[in-house]
Image (cartoon, grey):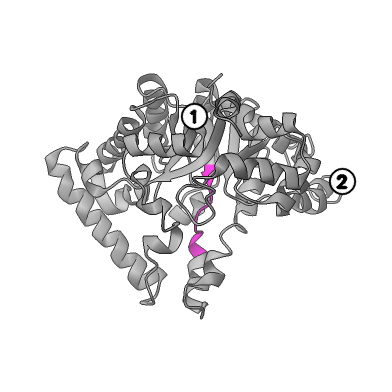
Amino acid sequence: MSATQAVHERLVSVDSHVHFTDDWIKARLRRELHAVWDEANRKAEEYAAKVLRGGQKNLELEDFVDPEASKDPGHFNPEGKLKAMDLDGVYAEVIFPELAGAKIVNPSLMGSDWKEVFQGYNNAMADFASHDPLRLMTAYQLPLYDIEFAVKEVQRLARDKKARCVQVTPFPADYGLPDVYDERYVPLWKTIEETGLTVLNHLDLKAELWNVFRRDPTPQKGIFTGLAWAPMAESISMWILTGTLEKYPKMKVLFVEPGLGWLPWFFETLLDPRMHQHYEFPGVKRPPSETFRAQCGATFMYEPMGLKAAYDYFGADCLYWSTDFPHPATCWPNSQRQVLSQFKEAGIPDADRRKITSENGLRTFGLK
């Protein structure tokens, strides 16, 4: 593919990762809060080691990244990120923080300081993106502990940081919180709908999955790491089968890194048929697959068969390509070639390839 074609198609990756160091975060916090950040990290790691991993082998960052990509400056600093994107022929990316991120910024670990630290964390993400606000789209963190604070943070990010998307945990119950349909979230979902921000539910490790980790006998915990996609079915169902998305018709939720191949089966075999059986879903007036097409979407990396199945079932408008830089599935720095080969293998026409790899992202995140 020529450079002209690469620029013309403007690839948009809806899932990429950067490693925000402790120093990067603490530079955006008052000096008095540096110790709060460090202590929260220490407590979180102690809990993970003793309780979640049960004293077993620790999984290092290297277990979750591509050896070459993870060492590239694009994993650590904004100047390097833009160069890595240029090398890959990618116009814009949605950026997620590596690993813990703002997960440690909560009342139980930080007491009354957590709100100020949370804003500082989002400011650190904004400073990274400020090097090119169009091409670097930050998946700003959004807490669900305090809805009044979350609403103000959405308004602040939309107003001051020109945010285009926010990341919400796919599993609120893991934090002792109600699921997304609960009335406590009404002000937050209304505000997100009003501001036009897109909600991102990124693949995450559900708390109960750590039981599999402790039982997994394989050296690199390959059983454990291969199952993270499955609980995403719960998140999808909570958003759709509770009528939550129909209640907020302008809100959009993207499921990031769920894998595509299982989604057509899940909707065709389990979700849609239940609308015509003896199950009752108050507030749900249309088939779940219709809501998914209208208000949801899913990202993927290299998955020709799954891509073909999802394309045939859902169409092109709710599918979003990603590089997943710098994780093992990344196509960096060969995205331009991989896109062409993957879509050719999937038998998808060029016009719909451009939709999935470029136009959907440009439209959803207001880049057109």
What is the x, y in percent for residue 255?
59, 43
Residue extending furthest toward the front: 2
Instruction: Pick the residue in front: 300 or 57.
Output: 300
Disc 1, SS: helix
Which residue is painted at 33% across and 51% down in the image? Answer: 104
Q: Is 170 placed above or below 67 here?
A: above
What is the x, y in percent for residue 75? Answer: 37, 46
194, above or below 36, in the image = above
- Quadrant position of the N terminus in the picture: top right
Q: Where on the picture, by quarter, is residue 60?
A: bottom left
Spatial CA span between label 2 and label 1: 32 Å
Q: Residue at the right extreme?
A: 276
Tell me where residue 81 sits by quadrant.
top left
**Would residue 129 be found to the left or right of residue 311 on screen?**
left
Q: Where is residue 120 in the image (x, y as percent from the top left)?
A: 27, 36
Q: Which amino acid does label 1 sit on?
A: Pro
* Quarter of the C terminus within the rendering: top right
Q: Name the residue type under label 2.
A: His
Q: Point out the stretch of residues depicted in magenta.
A: 201-208
| Residue 174 point in image, percent of width and height | 47, 56
Crowding near pointer 1: few (<14 within 10 Å), some, many (20+)?
some
Residue 283, visible in the rendered structure? no
Task: Specify the label residue 276 is tagged with.
Answer: 2
Q: Measuring 51% from the left and 42% from the top, which residue is drawn there?
A: 15
**What SS does tag 2 mark?**
loop
State whether residue 228 is above or below residue 352: below
- Which residue carries the number 1 mark? 187
Mark before the other along the chain sequence, 2 or 1: 1
> Is 258 colored magenta in this rendering?
no
